[in-house]
Image (cartoon, rainbow, N blue to C red):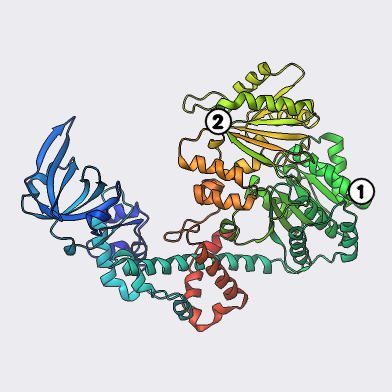
Amino acid sequence: MLSDSITAVKGVGEKFSEDLAALGIYTVEDLLNYFPYRYDVYEIKPLSELIHEDKVTIEGRVIHDPSLAFYGRKKSRLTFTVEVENVAVKAVMFNRAFAKKHINAGDIITLSGKWDVNRLQITVSNYKKGSADSQSQIQPMYSIKGNVTNQKLKKTIKTAIKDYADEIVEILPERYLTAYKIPERKNALTTMHFPRNRIDLKHARRRFTYEEFLLFQLKMQLLRKIKREATEGNAQNYHPYKVQEFISEFPFSLTKAQEKSLKQILADMKSPYRMNRLLQGDVGSGKTAVAAICLYASITAGKQGALMVPTEILAEQHYQSLSELFGDKANIILLTGSVKGKKRREILTSIENHTVDIIVGTHALIQDDVYFENLGFVIVDEQHRFGVEQRRTLRDKGLNPDVLFMTATPIPRTLAITAFGDMDVSVIDEMPVGRKEIETYWTKENTFERVLRFIEKQIALGEQAYVICPLIEESDKLDIQNAVDLFHQLKEFYPPDITVGLMHGRLHTDEKDNVMKEFAANDIQILVSTTVVEVGVNVPNATIMIIYDAERFGLSQLHQLRGRVGRGDKQSYCILIADPKGEVGKERMRIMTETINGFELSEQDLKLRGPGDFFGKKQSGVPEFKVADMIHDYRALETARADAQEIIESNMLELGEFHQLKEHLETSSFLTDKLD
């Protein structure tokens, strides 16, 4: 059986099994599913088609015996000439002194390595005596460590396939194999390890890409179904007419994207299942207005609402804006860590007695002594800032309240499908009419004084500026401007009537809040800061965002920082000061100056950085696939998601042809891990 210990494979003794265990290989199945991480293709092309500095393979006849030279400590250089297509090609091998005995004049030899078109020279990484026809053109390369070699691993896999091939069960229903023209599991698995040609390998990879995506999406859809069915009897019977009346009193009209998202959320609230939805929208797209309408709907259903945000200053801003929107239609209260003693006790009593409708606060909302009388709707803003436990605690405060997670970080659709597969996702991808676009410019450091003069001119018009830099204090490792230095420089540069403030992550929460309050009140005109201002803070009078060493930031982070300005009706500017050395850095700056749409930007960022870096590896929630790549295989991901939805919604796992797929899912530890 495939579940047999790896020692059941001929040639695997106790010592080798320990080496394989270090690679995560414990069973025969683990071994068969340990796919190569790359394939070296040994395809012989005419010399005229070889590209400079590419890895190439050539075949020829050795003209003379190799010459060997030693240099440095135990370093050697072996050189010989090979006749290829009647052309003399120089071959160089480093630290392969032993090869001198193997290679002789007159030998036919196949060489692979880096090609230098100018010198007609190949720097050899692999060689094989004989013609290329006598070896496989495609060589799988495995991730190995310790005493495990590629050769030994291949030999063991070959033995395992020979003895266990008939145990490999097809788990995909025939309809998908036919529809997508993908090979059966047994053949595809053999091809992954021992490809005969590029075409076969391409189809085998396609098969496992689809399989990985389908299994993951099925698990996510099942998880969603289990969560939904566990919370039946959760319908909120809100008053549609009152909600419509509330919307009509807004001083602005909702955009089509806001209306669409609102419709989706209200439908969730009416359904008997608990809502678990992510609302994502660019900075300034109007998420708060949608959230306010949903809170009001919940109030008309006789429930309480809660809005949890990561910082006190953000909580205060939300409290102010909601108070203005609601007027006397709701009783709103603010609960943060700063609220102490008698006032806190009074607030807790009013929450428990339901004399307040909406509670806005920080993580203070999830303290043990906070009791809600009837919590029906919970909004978690900038949800990635809270840990899973914090979010769960707030959810548990009510009888399975509907939960809406909000984020201003535009998450590419690719990542939303995978990382948030067990959530419904609503997107506000349209900006309100009349909002002025932030003008974005990229300049080098030698123009910094001109930038400072521009800031001075705008401050004279009553406006304010952010100046962002990556580090707090000087670092020997990175030659980049830091906040403390820059703060002192600007204080010296500007006259005393322009106040420069400093903000960074090492300040205590109270100190940060005080600095932000002073900036919001225009007591500080220029705020020098690290990226701690990235999320949520709203200072409509700030119209200039200067980002120093901008090449050190990812596109999404640059866009988030840019979104701190452009909050009022004045024209706003973002100036990137950067001198990127590499092409990726230059591309980032170019994209920033040309693209204002956060979703387009996030897709570009994903391509430049990859999924792990986009979220931060530790808390990404993005699965690691063996074969699939969710950026390049995006269409397969979409297809697998649609198929998974159909399978779960139509209960197709109960059909006979889905038997193996269902069994495979049931043996997976994924669902039990997620539900714990």
Report the label total.
Answer: 2
**Mark 1 or 2: the one toward you:** 2
* Quarter containing the C terminus: bottom right
Residue 327's disc number: 1
Residue 136 shown left or right of residue 502 in the figure: left
Amino acid at the residue labelled 2: Lys
Q: Which one is nearer the viewer's eye here, 669 or 295?
A: 295
How busy is the neighbourhood of tag 1: few (under 14 within 10 Å), some, or many (20 plus)?
few
First along the sequence among labels 1 and 2: 1
Q: Is residue 23 above or below residue 165?
A: above
Amino acid at the residue labelled 1: Gly
Q: Which one is nearer the viewer's eye here, 99 or 304?
A: 99
Q: Position of residue 453 (x, y in %)?
A: 68, 24
Please, what secondary structure does the residue beneath circle 2 have?
loop
The residue sitting at 34% across, 58% down in the picture is 36
Q: Quadrant of residue 589?
A: top right
Residue 300 shown left or right of residue 23 in the figure: right
Q: Position of residue 82 (x, y in %)?
A: 13, 50
Q: Position of residue 6 (x, y in %)?
A: 31, 62
The residue sitting at 55% across, 50% down in the picture is 604
Q: Position of residue 218 (x, y in %)?
A: 55, 68
Residue closest to the far right: 328
- What residue is pinned by disc 2? 444
Q: Quadrant of residue 155?
A: bottom left
Residue 374 seen in render: no
Q: Is residue 2 above or below residue 335?
A: below
